[in-house]
Amino acid sequence: MNALRRLVGAPGWVLSLWLLELALVAWNAAAPRAIANTAMGRHAALGTDRWLSVLIDVGFDHPELVVAALGTLAQTGIVALLGWVLLASPTIVRLSKRDTFTHVMAIALPHVPGLVVTSLWHVLLRAVLLAIVVMAALPLPPWAQVCSLAIALAFSNVALDLARVRVVLREAPRFHIRTAWLGFRDALTHAKLLTAGMALSLAQGCFVAAMVWIALAGLGSSWLLLVARGMALVVVVLGLWRIALAVEVTEPPREPPTS
C-alpha cells in the first residue's frame, strides 16, 4: 500500500507518461496508415472485416509494403523501449521524492547513462534465463511452456526494476554487470515484492494483449479505440506501481529530523 501511495502522490507524472505514450503511438502509426491507405485506394472505405482481408491480399501482391510497415512497427518498439529506459531514472526519483520537476530532473539525468548500461547487461542475463527456461520446458505441454515463459519474463521485469532503482537510489556501480545480477538476487530475497511485482507484470501483459486486440478489432469504431487508449493508461499505472514497489524496498531509510 505504501507503494500505491507513492503512485497516487504523483498523478501528474502518471498522466504525462500516458499522454506521451499516446502521442508516440499516434506519431508512429501515421506511416503505416498512409502506406495502407495508398495501397488499398478505394477499398480503404470498407468495413473492418473486409478492410483487413483486402490489406492482406495487397500485402501478398506488394511485399515491399509489408516490409515498410513492419520496419515502422519495429521502429515504434525500439523508440518506445528507449523512451522507457530514458524515463526510468526521473520516474524512480519522482516516486522516491515529492519534489519539483526541475529538481527531479537535476537528480535523475546523471543516472541515465548508468541505467542504459545496466539495462543492456540485464538483456544479456534475461536472455540466458529465458534460454534455460525454454530448454527446461521443452518436455512440457504447450500451455505449460507459455506459462513458464510468462513467469520468467515477469520475474525478469521485477529484477530489472530493482537493478535500476539500486543504481539511482543506492549509487550502485553503474557500468558493472554485477548490478544487473544483484537485481535478480534481490528479487529472490524479497518474497512479497516478487509476488506482487510478478502479479503486476503479468496483469500488465494481459492488458497489453487485450489492448492490441481491441485496437485491431476497433479499426472502424471510435469508441473501441477510446477503450484501448483507456487500457493504455491502466498499463502505465501497473508499470509504475511495479517500480514504486522496487523503490519502497530499496530506498535508503530516511534520517530522523534533528531537533
Image (cartoon, rainbow, N blue to C red):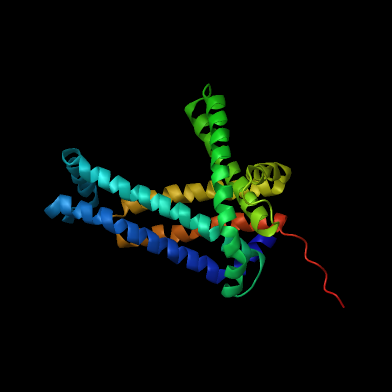
Q: Is residue 58 left or right of residue 222?
A: left
Assign the N terminus to one quadrant of the image.
bottom right
> Can residue 1 be spotted in the picture?
no
| Left or right: 68 in relation to 114 | left
Q: Which residue is drawn at 24% across and 51% down?
A: 48
Q: Which residue lies furthest to the left in this view?
A: 42
- The vertical placement of 63 against 101, above or below, is above
The residue depicted at 44 percent of the width and 64 percent of the height is 20
Q: Where is residue 258 in the image (x, y as percent from the top left)?
A: 85, 75
* Residue 168 drawn at (x, y percent): 65, 58
Residue 54, x across and y down, in percent: 18, 45
Nearer-the-camera pick, 242 or 251: 251
At x 69%, y 62%, the residue is 2
Residue 82 left/right relative to 33: right
Q: How many marks?
A: 0
Image quarter (top left, top right, bottom left or bottom right) of the C terminus: bottom right
| Rendered position, 87 above or below 217 | below
- In the rendered image, is residue 34 in sight? yes
The extreme bottom residue here reads 259
Q: Residue 157: x percent and y percent?
A: 57, 46
Q: Quadrant of residue 38?
A: bottom left
Residue pictured at 68% horizontal, 49% vertical: 193
Work out whether 191 lies above or below 258: above
Depth order, front residue of 180/186: 180
